[in-house]
Image (cartoon, helix red, strand yellow):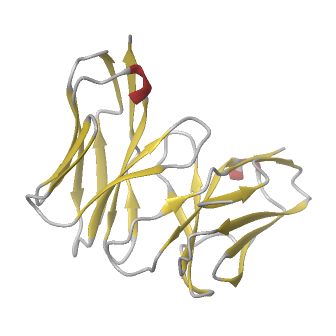
Amino acid sequence: ETGVTQTPRHLVMGMTNKKSLKCEQHLGHNAMYWYKQSAKKPLELMFVYSLEERVENNSVPSRFSPECPNSSHLFLHLHTLQPEDSALYLCASSPSIAGGDEQFFGPGTRLTVL
Amino acid sequence: EDQVTQSPEALRLQEGESSSLNCSYTVSGLRGLFWYRQDPGKGPEFLFTLYSAGEEKEKERLKATLTKKESFLHITAPKPEDSATYLCAVQTSKFYFGSGTKLNVKP
């Protein structure tokens, strides 16, 4: 595996379900990110981790819970979601959170909340 | 307020018809400006990073330029395979993405 991988690629869940999204980066990077991409809206940065420590949480509802057990893995735990949470969830990594480092994205998880 | 605006929202070109996409920004403390390409159902693919006004970078039919207030992505003699959404992002102490320009190149 190379680059940034995400599983599952597609997920359909009910509002009462609990599920998790997984991201793994094979680039040796120290920073990882979760983004939400909704139709016709800019990418919304949700969480930033640097060396497994959360450094940014952009007013994301508590029904989204991130976890970063090590610098290669990132999870997004989902519970009691709303239909408006349906979107493409993208994971990214970069060498560091310092200025000027480009981010490398995974393919995303297409989430549908019924 | 920090802001990134891309124009046009959508652009239709004939194969071979050169054009430019615009990314204007109003931010404090620019650390880098990034261009990405995104195909439907996929994650953004990194294209270029620009750090300072006057800088230019090229890759195949694409050329990115940067001024103090905007960046252009010039597409020379585009091909149908260049059809995608092109995203601009600006980094200060945070990352800000534009809404993208959806490019459609017809044969």
* Residue located 49% across and 54% down the image: A43
Residue B4: give x, y in percent of width and height.
30, 55
Please, is residue A52 above or below residue A80 in the view?
below
| Residue B63 in which image quadrant | top left
Can residue B67 be seen here? The reply is yes
Q: Quadrant of the C terminus of chain B?
A: top left
Residue B93: give x, y in percent of width and height.
35, 78
Q: From the viewer's side, name the closer residue of A74 and A65.
A: A74
Residue A68: give x, y in percent of width and height.
69, 81
Q: From the viewer's side, name the closer residue of A6 and A27.
A: A27
Can residue B1 be seen here? The reply is no
A56 sits to left or right of A87 = left
* Residue located 46% across and 64% down the image: A103
Please, is residue A86 above or below residue A59 in the view?
above
A103 sits to left or right of A101 = right
Please, is residue B55 above or below residue B43 in the view?
below
Q: From the viewer's side, name the closer residue of A21 and B76.
A: B76
Q: Quadrant of the N terminus of chain B?
A: bottom left
